[in-house]
Image (tube, rainbow, N blue to C red):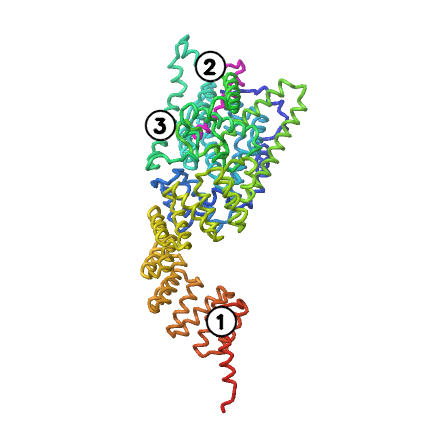
Amino acid sequence: MVLSEVPWDHRIPLPALTPGQARGAVALLALLCFINSYDGEFVFDDSEAIVNNKDLKPTTPLSNIWSNDFWGSNLSSNSSHKSYRPLTVLTFRLNYLLAGGLHPIGFHVLNIILHAVISALMIEVFAILIGGLDYDETGRILNHAPKTSLLAALFFAAHPIHTESVAGVVGRADLLCALFFQLSFLTYCKAFSRGSDGAYRMCVQWVVVSILLCAAAMLCKEQGITVLGVNAAFDVLLICNVNVYELSQRLLLRKTPLNMREVLRTGLPTRLALMGFGGMSMLYARWRIMGTGPPAFTEVDNPASFADNIFLRIVNYNYYYSLNAWLLLCPWWLCFDWSMGCVPLIKSATDWRMVWLLLLWCILIGLISQALCSQDGQRRRTLTLGLVLLVVPFLPASNVFFRVGFVIAERVLYLSSAGSCLLLASCLGHCCCRWARHWKLLCVCVWSLLCVYAARCALRSNQWRSEQRLFTSALSVCPLNAKVHYNVGKNLADRGNTTAAIGYYREAVRLHPTYVHAMNNLGNILKERNELLEAEQLLSRAVSIQPDFAAAWMNLGIVQNSLQKFEEAEHSYWNAIRFRRKYPDCYYNLGRLYADQNRHVDALNAWRNATMLKPEHSLAWNNMVILLDNTGNLGQAELIGREALRILPYDHTIMFSLANVLGKLQKYKESEGFFLHALRINPNAASCHGNLAVLYHRWGKLELAKKHYELSLKLDPQAPGTKDNYNMLLRKLDQLKQPPP
């Protein structure tokens, strides 16, 4: 249906712009709001989805992105998150190839550009939803609500809720999904053209293309399938001009029978059948791809879904909805993670937070009643489509159809925010008409809101530039969130401030007494500080809470080895390997345990297993060479050292160890070559200079020996044995200088 005039549009306090100018203004605002995140780091989930994701590397077969999840794990694995987003991963891989590695600027710039393009396209989407579908003589869509659609697009471009999706690289999934969502909707609109009789004609090919674009959106993020619901609502309300309220009255009260011939004439059943078939096919394919079924989430991820009874689940789900609505309305308190106590559960009907649920449903019922019963057809359609755009994209995150792995996630509101922006712009338009006397005040309010949004975006984007800022910013928003304290502590530990990190890890454990990852990290720090007894207690507690926590078992073994509890340490290491069969670091530490017990064969076997699982495991290779050297197996040590250098040709530690072996075998020339190569890589290695000096001393090159002894002592005056060897050399040189008797 064409709406020739949107009565409130001319009252919107914005200048009249051409379509090109409007798109440019919206894109520019989007760029300005988020441009300061262009040089940010990889933060939070970026480490798993990008930095540690092997699917991005050119050496990984391209076909892997179609069988692995968003995080690089095989979809058939029980530990897989089941997030199937191959097109998003493909763009990450292209970023990697174009930048020649993991350089975050290229990733961030593309995110910002995508948001600017999506924001500009929103003008056309809003124009159709508000002003209807109409074409000029050239076949281009006419905008009957230029100012309202521009205002809604400006709100969308500057909405702070988008910061996570734009400034966080993993938000690429939401951006690409939104882009294909828009293209699918606009393509669906293109399927309709007006005939000479004023009625719409349908082109089935464009409907099929729209469904294919929906599939592309779904391959970027699962939320993309919801565009089919928006397309169906658009078809019913604008193309077929159905009055939902009158239709429901006719069906429920049976006052007037439904004219099926008229319904069939519109072609609506055909289009709905096509979209239904396409949607069911996509869902079936998605289910088959998931392999082992839906992902398994824990109570920590989504505590409301584990509530004792259905009443408490429904109450808490609705409380989550109210918080999401509040974030759309007032996006000031933003947090990278809302789990682990950030939103305490409502456990009784007397909880004061029940007020928020009642308020939410009062507002929704008021909007729905206006959308259904308003005498103003324009207002009725705009409100209905705004609510559809608000609610339908949110449905996959609502816990209605399946359990989700989060409490609140700002990124999932990217598309839903378009509906809230449409409703806000329409509401302001009505206010401008009704309160014309206060037009200047409304104008100030509109521009002030845009400025506040833009300022909040700039501030929040700056926080997303580094993990330190991001994690610290969450402390004031979610002080009860154990994961926030954990991440602050981890970031401090990574930067070397272990003393401060301990306090945050302890607070994380206090807030969430079964937080095994915090216990593991705290235990590691205490281990490094030689506070072994408390470290052992923490790690033992972690594995008792989560018996399959392989990393904690390994760390417990390291602590027990340091406490000389050798049997317990061996038991812990083997538990770690039982729960993670391919665990090269654990085999390495097991080898160290065996070496401490003089179980040389077992140590060599453990280190060999480590190198088989991880051929570039330098420490395991080096320890094998050193152990064989110390036990007199020089020939085997030489073979192992040469094998290691074929895999790690620039590892100076292995060169050093092999050079020592070759020196003992009196292969002085080869030994000298490895020593010198190691020193070219690491010229400040005092031990390397000292051992090279010993080689020259044995070889009879005394001046060179003197030079390298002096270099070694200059780098490390306390180097064991070097000073004695140097003094011995000086005495020998003095003897050589004395004339024969």
Question: Mark 3: which amino acid?
Answer: Phe
Badge 2 crowding class, 10 Å Cα cut-off, few under 14, some 14 to 19, many 20 or more, is some
Residue hosting label 3: 277
Of marks 2 and 1, which one's residue comes earlier in the chain? 2
Residue 178 image offset from top left, x and y in percent: 48, 34
Taking the spot 46% from the left edge, 71% from the top edge, the residue there is: 692
Taking the spot 40% from the left edge, 45% from the top edge, the residue there is: 540
Residue 270 image offset from top left, x and y in percent: 37, 23
Q: Which residues are the magenta region?
A: 373-397
- Quadrant assignment, res 639: bottom left
Taking the spot 43% from the left edge, 42% from the top edge, the residue there is: 516
Badge 3 crowding class, 10 Å Cα cut-off, few under 14, some 14 to 19, many 20 or more, is few
Alpha carbons under labels 2 and 3: distance apart: 27 Å
Of marks 3 and 1, which one's residue comes earlier in the chain? 3
Residue hosting label 2: 245
- 631 vs 239: above or below: below
Residue hosting label 1: 722
**SS of the residue under disc 2:** helix
Residue toward you, 683 or 222: 683
